[in-house]
Image (spheres, rainbow, N blue to C red):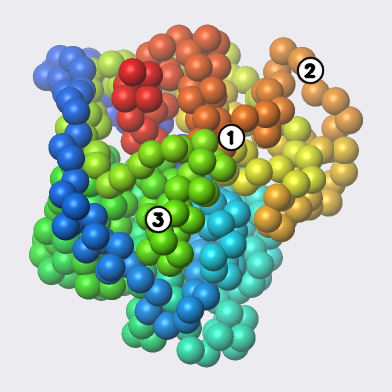
Amino acid sequence: MNWRRVKWIGFGAVALVAIIFGGWILTLPPAPSVAAAPPIAKEEAAATIAALKPPKRQRPLIAIIGINDATETTDYLMPYGILRRADVADVVTLATRSGPMSLFPVFKVEPQATVAEFDAQHPEGADYVIVPAMSRDDDPSALQWIRSQAAKGAIVIGVCAGAKVVGDAGLLNGKRATTHWYYLRELRDRHPSIRYVANRRLVVDGGVATTTGITASMPMSLTLIEAIAGREKAEAVGRDIGLADWDLRHDSNAFQFTRPFALTAIHNVMAFWNRERLGIELSPGVDEVSLALVADAWSRTYRSRAVTFANTAGALATRNGLRIVPDAVATNWPAEQRLPAIGGSPPAQALDQALSGIEARYGASTADFVAMQLEYPRQAAQR
């Protein structure tokens, strides 16, 4: 069990209590309100790109910060994988202290440096600091380092619930911002001067950017590539990862706590006797983006958890040199408990394939439940 899994399981417990005491669940909307996301004006798109231009170097330095206790898997790995693939910046993964980092809901990785080592190597600071969701929003070391980087002129990007960390660092006061749908109320309660912007995957204001849910780090990364190296380069990377088109639009009303979401959480939590441990073979050179999306999705069903296995206990290097420690040493894995090999299709298609596999195994309600957690517009992808 892990910090954020406990939080999501809490949803099911709360909903169960509500059914017994007052029928609260019947007051929830029966389905999300899905509509076409409003278009983005050309002027707004251009202003976003301009606001994300490299502040210091022609070839920027991008630091992705996490804490060792638990940092969200896709928030941490997807920007790294896409930005390294683009090769338009130097990208480094950091932790607040030495030693391996436990990601949530799956993986243990070896960060490339600590924040202290980064500061010693780059006293002038980074151009961009990417802040994923973390097990605690008020980690003193993380907050101090993020503030220091902002003071040195870095553009700070809070991915998903990483906006709460950025907010606790004092960088969102009076600014326009967004975050994961579930944490929006908490963010606004803690930082009432924030001006929430709906229907946007990415919001930039005054040297600070924030995104919606976990899957927003893909369009965010492509937008950042466009700001650094131009639209043509970003489109080339988008084609390479299987995302031919993207922009900032988002249908915020499609993501909310609904009756089917609560009922699925209750049903799957109560089926505690039927948990599955699904193996993903970890091979050298595996794509970080595909790996993160597949493992993240399968670990959020409340019915299964993805684990990595390899024929060695040592860490294995991914496509772009990040080292991941396998969860288990095995030369084989039971076929019925083994997920498809990573890398057979472009990374942008990996999540759709994982959700299709989840639907086939556990039903459409569980696939929708996972997509809602990831704030992924599955309905739009299916059209």
Considering the image in quadrants, where does the N terminus appear?
top right
Distance between mark 1 and mark 3 Cα atoms: 20 Å
Secondary structure category for the residue under label 2: loop
Which numbered circle lies on residue 231? 3
- Residue type at mark 3? Arg
How packed mark 2 is, by other alpha carbons closer than 10 Å (few <14, some 14-19, many 20 or more), is few
Query: Could you tell me which residue is drawn at 16 percent across and 66 percent down?
Result: 175
Residue shown at 31%/25% (left/top)? 380
Location of residue 229 in the rendering, given as x and y in whole percent from the top left corner? 45, 64
Q: Is residue 82 left or right of residue 32?
A: right
Secondary structure of the residue carrying numbered label 1 = loop
Provide residue 66's location: percent of width, then percent of height: 51, 62
SS class, disc 3: helix
Looking at the picture, does residue 107 appear above or below residue 109?
above
Q: Does any portion of residue 233 appear in the rendered image? A: yes
* Position of 197 relative to 376 (above/below): below
Q: Which residue is mark 2?
A: 334
* Type of the residue with mark 2: Pro
Q: Nearer the viewer, residue 175 or 230?
A: 230
Q: Quadrant of residue 354?
A: top right
Of labels 3 and 2, earlier in sequence is: 3
Dot placed on the residue nearer the N-terminal end, 1 or 3: 3
In the image, which disc is placed on residue 346?
Answer: 1
